[in-house]
Image: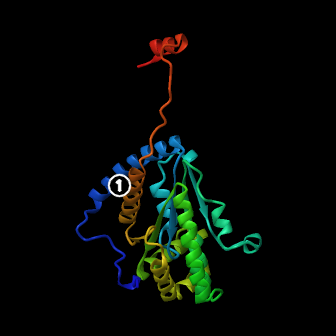
């Protein structure tokens, strides 16, 4: 049983902040190249799931980690309160529609896990229904993985103190006030419930597609951890540029190479 209250929200003490930030820059350069290869190959895809409580830094992680990526090969969707049309379908319908095509990196800012988290905190779904949904989620993710989509799931683990500091920052910073709502404080009061149900998410998750619990009090470490994990995963996927057969003896091609080739 996961006990998130016993897991640190801070970077390992032995890590040097400035050295880690330099390593992250190098990793971001690698990520750019790997994403280009993934997009060119068009045989595999990557789904990146960000979950975490309000103020954990999901938006910031998306912006920092993917800022250097070719926008043609990346998609992002944020799952908010379901619409009337979405509620008329099964709970995975709105999510499956956004599964990444071959060659793409797809980011889920919140995800299908909202349907075993917030709905339980608010009392809309009971434990029996949640257990059924866990199985459906595991089957859904296995379907994606079996058809060429690798899945990375990140839970951004933020402390109570940092969460409140970020709420206060949203209140006083005009550029961030749009992110703040009174309901954020109401949800904060339910923090223990959220931690409990997140623990159940991790316990019921398929071991083949595990969660990464990311200490997120310090943005520099959060960004390093996520970037490193994505780069390692893409290296394991090993996307390759397609090999195109070009007849260099063709007169026009030969002339093109002679005049402009380096």
**For the residue labelled by badge 1, is the local secondary structure a helix, a strand or a loop?**
helix
What is the quadrant of residue 7 in the picture?
Answer: bottom left
The answer to whether 87 appears left or right of 194 in the picture is: right
Q: Picture coordinates of residue 166 (x, y %)?
A: 47, 74
The answer to whether residue 94 is above or below residue 37 is: below
Q: Residue at x 51, y 84 (%)?
A: 197
Residue placed most toward the observer, 54 or 45: 45
Q: Residue at x 53, y 65 (%)?
A: 142
| Label 1 Cα neighbours within 10 Å, binned few <14 / some 14-19 / many ≥20 | many
Q: Picture coordinates of residue 135 (x, y %)?
A: 56, 76
What is the quadrant of residue 91 in the picture?
Answer: bottom right
The answer to whether 112 appears left or right of 223 in the picture is: right
Q: Picture coordinates of residue 200 (x, y %)?
A: 48, 83
* Colour pattern: rainbow
Q: Residue at x 40, y 83 (%)?
A: 2
Q: Residue at x 61, y 77 (%)?
A: 115
Q: Picture coordinates of residue 181 (x, y %)?
A: 61, 77
Q: Which residue is mark 1?
A: 24
The answer to whether 138 appears left or right of 214 in the picture is: right
**Looking at the figure, which quarter contains the C terminus?**
top left
Residue placed most toward the observer, 260 or 254: 254
What is the quadrant of residue 252 in the picture?
Answer: top right
The answer to whether residue 26 is above or below residue 248 is: below
């Amino acid at each position: 049983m996961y006990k998130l209250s016993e897991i640190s929200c801070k970077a390992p003490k032995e890590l040097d902040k400035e050295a880690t930030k330099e390593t992250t820059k190098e990793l971001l350069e690698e990520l750019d190249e790997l994403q280009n290869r993934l997009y060119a190959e068009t045989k595999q895809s990557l789904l990146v799931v960000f979950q975490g409580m309000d103020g954990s830094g999901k938006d910031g992680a998306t912006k920092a980690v993917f800022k250097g990526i070719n926008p043609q090969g990346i998609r992002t969707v944020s799952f908010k309160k379901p619409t009337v049309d979405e509620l008329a379908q099964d709970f995975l319908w709105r999510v499956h529609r956004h599964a990444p095509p071959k060659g793409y990196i797809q980011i889920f800012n919140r995800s299908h896990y909202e349907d075993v988290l917030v709905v339980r905190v608010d009392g809309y779904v009971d434990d029996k229904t949640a257990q059924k949904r866990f199985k459906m989620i595991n089957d859904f993710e296995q379907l994606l993985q079996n058809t060429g989509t690798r899945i990375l799931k990140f839970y951004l683990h933020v402390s109570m103190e940092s969460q409140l500091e970020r709420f206060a920052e949203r209140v006083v910073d005009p550029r961030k006030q749009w992110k703040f709502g009174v309901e954020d404080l109401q949800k904060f009061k339910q923090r223990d419930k959220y931690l409990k149900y997140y623990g159940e998410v991790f316990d019921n998750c398929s071991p083949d597609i595990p969660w990464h619990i990311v200490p997120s009090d310090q943005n520099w470490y959060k960004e390093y951890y996520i970037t490193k994990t994505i780069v390692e995963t893409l290296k394991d996927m090993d996307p390759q540029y397609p090999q195109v057969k070009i007849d260099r003896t063709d007169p026009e091609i030969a002339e093109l190479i002679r005049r402009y080739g380096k």
